[in-house]
Structure formats: structure tokens, C-alpha cells
Image (tube, rainbow, N blue to C red):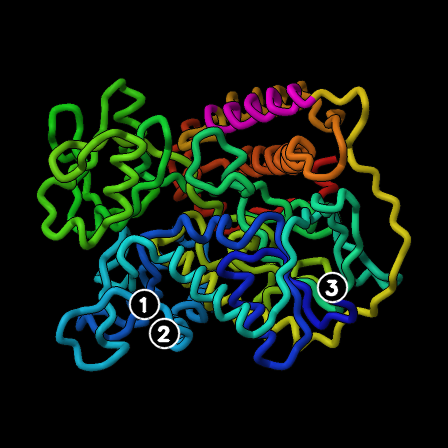
Amino acid sequence: MSNLDLLIVGSGISGLSAAISAKLSGARVEVITKSIPTKCNSVMAQGGINAALGNVEEDSVESHIKDTLKASHNLANKEMVELLCSNARGSIEFLEQIGLAFSRIDGAKSAIGSIAQRKLGGASSKRACYAQDYTGLKILHTLLDYTLNLDIEISEGLFLIDLIKNSKGEVCGVLAYNFNSGRVESIYAKRVLLATGGFGSIYSKNTNSLGSSGDGIVAVLKAGGELSNLEFVQFHPTTLKVSNILISESARGEGGYLVDSNGERFIDELAPRDVVAKEIFDKVSANQSVYLDLRHIKDIEKLMPQELKLIKTYAKVDAKSELVEIEPAVHYTMGGISVDSNFRAKNLSGVYAVGECSNSNVHGANRLGGNSLLEAVTFGRLAAKSALSFDGSKIEEQDINYKLPLSSSGDNFAIFKAKDKLSSLLFNSVGIVRDKKGLQEAKESIDSLSIESLSATGDSRYNTNLVELLELKNSNILAKALIELALWRRESRGAHIRADYPETDTNFAKSSSITLEDLA
């Protein structure tokens, strides 16, 4: 499609929510995506989507705001948190209207009042609306069906390389590698909205989809934008040992226990994720095993069918009668593209960002469980409205000569070897607990990998090695930026724990920031 009002990069919950909002306002909109919508990270979210609906007497929007700010360790922006939480009910109503099948309370009188809710970590009451333990997947499928019914074009197999600017410096499109055709294409639009997800897959142990390599984040950095809070990487406390398959917080929300090798509970299972992950990390570091105990939960097959199946498939354990060994793994990245209250990327005109690729200042140092899906739906819709309120960049088509990193002397094995080294290095040195010595060593080790000079071999069409290399090059840039900010934040706050600075320092009660010039 040409002469687009809005080009959305990313087909997860944020991107599709934005696309629907834009289309319903009459805008000409297109979505491009690297993979296919159902392979996005959104489908990994299982536990629920937060909203104070009034179904639980002690809950309120004010309590939701308070819990979110507390979980953020005083780093979230109160106005943005208020925007998120006050629009939560409206987001649930929107999802209901387009056909999402929430789990229900038997005998409830009203539609909104019949939605079942569970308590997740860090919440003061039952607030997470859910669809069994398939919440993210069902939201994504519902949005996708509605998107297709609105005849919104979704173009798959397009890898974001760069943002295109006009002569005024405004972003007026994107440069993308089409791995179906093997060509690099320019796609123009008056406004670009990035919903490309986070960068959790750059770590060796993670719960993310394979393509979560921060492509949109790096594109903004290269275009002159700013990134912030990259050092805050959330580790989910409960993933299956070795495979790191996510076992949702809903398992603990429904009453699951965490026990050590002696079978003893050692922590409040519904404490904030950063607290629980650190306690489990300490146990594992002391050569102890940690288990999730679900044996006592009634109606577990009805409440968590997916969890039982995943545990049986990947751990060969029957969770109804056996303990499940778990360990923490990277789950969510709080930082990303710096945006203002209208979701505009800082230092750039014509480009907006939403969802996990952005830092909209609602998560701070630690995300409250159940708020990621809420952010994706709520801010996705609001970001589209904000983008369309901008007059729009002047579209100037250009001849752009971009050379893909392909050569006859390329080494595909070297790509995977470097990826393995980088991801392991990050998990071991920039993991749950960091220190200056480890961060400095990681920085030097990354430089020695010489990832910038790598090239792939083979044809440009359907070349998965080339895609892996493009992702690796983005991972390399993000890893360096992450380490710089982790070195800068000389304190322990939320998901960022410095062994050499164990206390929280009020001098750092602000967001970090970094630009491409800072990495030069």
C-alpha cells in the first residue's frame, strides 16, 4: 500500500491494538512483521491482564496505581501509571466487545462483573482478568481475527533494518529486508509506529520467542533516538529447569508453593518478581534445588490446562502428583525506546513506539505482573490516536543502497557460535546479580567477538542464517548499551542488583539514558 497514514511495525498485541484503533478512525494503515502474528512474544503471556473492575471489594484504580508505583521502586512516572490504570476497565470492555472469551465467575450478574480474576505477584488484591492460562494467546487471536475482518493488510517476512528520514529529518518510512523476495525494500508512510517487542532472547536462558532481538529499539538508536532503562531486565522466577519453558505466575496466583530441597517454603510466593527471582537465584547458587508445588490445588486441570501440559511435555513430570523443578530466566525488558506522554520517540519526529520496545515509564525498575498485557492493549490504542494527531511527515522517496551482510566468504557456523557466546556471556555477567568486574569483563569479551565483521553465505531469499545474523548484530549493539547503563547505575534497584552496590541510592531515582554517540 502506498500513501499510508500509519505504518505499524510489529504484529503482537500492541501492534494489532494500534492497527484496529487507527483503522476505525478512518486511517490508511498497514502492519509489517518479521514473522507471523502468532509467533510473537505476546502469546507467551499466560497469567492475566490487570484491571480494577470493582468485582473485588477491596480493589480500586487507586490501589492498582499504588501497586504499580511500588513495584517500580520509585522509577515509574505517576502520570503515565495513572493513564494506564484508569484506562484498564475500558481495555477489558474493548476486548469483550470484539469477542475475547474470558474465564467467568459462576452466577455473576453482569458481563463485566462475571469476569474471573486472580491475584498475581505484587498485587494487593485479585486483579488479573484471565482466560484460563492462555490469556495472551487468546487476546492475540481475538485481535488478529478482528484485524483481518477490518481488511487491515498484514505483510509478513519483513525485517526492520533502518528508519528512513526526509530532508527535514522527519521519519517517513522504513527500510526492510524482505526474506521472501530476498530484496531490501523501502516502505513509506506519514507516521511510523514501532511495536517490535523487547530483547529478552539475547540472553541464553529466556522465556521469549526467538525473534525478540530488539530490532525496533536498535533502529531508533541508529536513527538518533534515545534509549533508557535497558539495565532493568526482569527474570521470571518460575521456568522449567534446563528448558526454561515459562510456568506462569498464575500457578502461584492459584496457590502454588515454592519449596527448597528440604520441601520447605522459603518466601511469599506472591512477592514482586524481582524479590522472588533473587531468592531462588540465591538457593540455586548455593547448589540447592527449588521446586514449584501444585499438588494441593483444586480444579487445577480446569484452571491451568496449558501449564500441566507444558510440564508433562518438557519436564516429564505430572504436576498433579509431583514437584516441578524450576529456575529463573529472562522474561521481560523494562527499558527501551524513550518516549514522551504521547508515545513519540525522543529526538525523532514522525516515529512512535509502544509495548515492550518502548520505555513509557510505567514499569520502572520492575514490572508488576499482569501489567504487560494491559500496557499492550491500552497504550497500543492510545499510541495510534497520538500518532494520527501529528500532521505527518512529508514522504520523500529515495534511492537507498543497503548491502546485506552476505558474501561468498561468509561463515554461517561462526554466526551461531558468536550468538551462543554472547547470550551466555550476558546471562552469566549481566544476569540477576552483577558487579563492576563482571560487567567490564563482559564488555571486553563482546568486543573480542567481532560480530560487526561477520557475514552470512547463501542466497538472499529464505536465508535463515542471514536473519540470525541481522538479529545478532542488533543483539550486539543492545548488549553494549545494556552494559554501559548497568555500569552507570551504581545501586541495587528492582531487577538491577549490583553485588558491589547492594543498597538503593536516592541519587539514582531517575531513568537512565543512552544514545548512539555514547557508544562510539
Part of the protein shown in magenta: 412-428
Most common secondary structure along the magenta stretch: helix
The amino acid marked with disc number 1 is Ala
Query: Considering depth in this image, is 90 or 240 the residue closer to the camera?
Result: 240
The answer to whether residue 60 of the structure is visible from this angle is yes
Q: Residues within 10 Å of mark 1 (few under 14, many from 20)?
A: some
- Locate residue 93, reporting x and y percent: 37, 76
Residue 277 in the image: state x and y as whole percent.
Answer: 32, 37
Q: CA distance from mark 1 to mark 3?
A: 39 Å
**Percent position of residue 252, x then y:** 21, 47
Judging by the rendered image, the residue that carries numbered circle 1 is: 101
Residue occupying image coordinates x 55% and y 33%? 487
Disc 2 residue type (three-letter): Glu
**Label 2: how many Cα within 10 Å (few below 14, some 14–19, many 20+):** some
- Per the image, label 2 sits on a secondary structure element best described as helix
How far apart in space, not on screen, are marks 2 and 1 (Cα)?
7 Å
The answer to whether 439 appears left or right of 393 in the picture is: left
**Residue of label 3:** 349
Few, some or many residues within 10 Å of mark 3 (<14, 14–19, 20+): many
Name the residue that disc number 2 marks: 96
From this view, report whether residue 403 is shown above or below residue 446.
below
Quadrant holding the N terminus: bottom right
